[in-house]
Image (cartoon, rainbow, N blue to C red):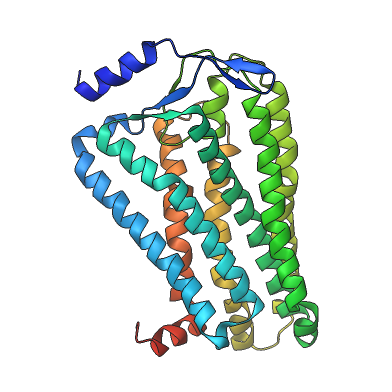
Amino acid sequence: MTSGQTKLSLRSSLVIPEVNFGRNQTTVTEFILLGFRGLQSFKIPVFLLLLIFHLVTLSGNLLIIWLVVSNKALHSPMYFFLTHLSLCDTFLTLCIVPEALWLIWHGGGTMSFLRCIVQFDCFACSEASECLLLSVMAYDRYLAICYPLHYNYLMNPVLCRTLVSISWLLSFFAVLTDTVSITQLQFCGPNTIDHFFCDFAPILELSCSDTTFVEMALFILCIPVAVFPLLVIVVSYIYIVLAVLRISSKSGRRKTFSTCSSHLTVVSIFYGTLIGIYMLPAKGKSLNVSKVLSLLYTVLTPMMNPIIYSLRNNDIHEAMKKWGLC
């Protein structure tokens, strides 16, 4: 047994003082996160790969934000929403990846109860915001293609700011409600999480309280922040496809639909991984598979979003050429 594993096992056997959260008490003030136990033989390559992904994600999303802010040609609703999507991805990767790098390097680690709850809150808020922002972007594309003559009037700056504000505020308060309900649970041991971050299910598995109410609350809160946005996206694209099919020329159809291709790709990756980890049955799905799927939407998706939008967007290309970046 390594020295790091010995320390973790000793920590897990310690009697930890009680901390009050509302009416209930908990005897657990810290959690032990195991991270990627089977990767210790490849610790350095995995650490460097994840670090590169992290730096590329931050650079790509910050570049998108800077290009949109600094170029008047990109001051349109679509790019306004894109900057907030990049902010969301930046927030997500800063919330998850540094801690994952620490766990990989040290072969696991501990996290205080409060810090674990804060990480879950940041993670869930960024995921909920991304769901809502992607639905707003789908609605924007629907108006641009189905009502091109009235688009500037319909998608005015006031509506843009309102939609973005609702996305952030709704996700914040929805996640805050769920977070408060988690802090009312009792955690009396064990305190080991076999994951690389504090996700909802691993936290609830450690509770010695009845979690039915918390799970029901999460299910209800997922309707406005995840299910409804997906319905908006699906309905928007149904109308977009019908509008594109009415265009007589093949080149016209291709050009019109190309304005949605980047967004549709991002939606497919994001919701595909989200459904894979949260909506498919957990039975028969190993912990390693769950961790890989979690890596997809916490690490790869935030990295791919700016790449997809920059590679498939002529306006972004022109903005980059203006600054000598390509």
Looking at the picture, how far across and down is residue 183, in whole percent?
Answer: 62, 27
In the picture provided, is 21 more to the left or to the right than 116? right
Quarter of the image holding residue 3?
Answer: top left
Q: Residue at x 58, y 41 (%)?
A: 121
Please give left or right for residue 236 compared with residue 20 in the image. right
Residue at image point 62% right, 77% down:
257
Above or below 138: residue 324: below
Instruction: State the image coordinates of residue 149 (x, y, percent, origin top left).
Output: 78, 88
Q: Is residue 237 visible?
A: no
- The spot of residue 191 in percent (x, y) is 46, 19
Quarter occupied by residue 317: bottom left
Tally of numbered tags: 0
Relative side of 135 to 111, left or right? right
Could you tell me residue 299's position as x and y percent?
A: 42, 51
Instruction: Please tell me whether residue 295 is drawn above or below residue 137 in the rendered image.
Output: above
Q: Quadrant of the N terminus?
A: top left
Q: Residue at x 56, y 88 (%)?
A: 73
Can residue 175 be seen here? The reply is yes
Q: Which image quadrant: the C terminus? A: bottom left
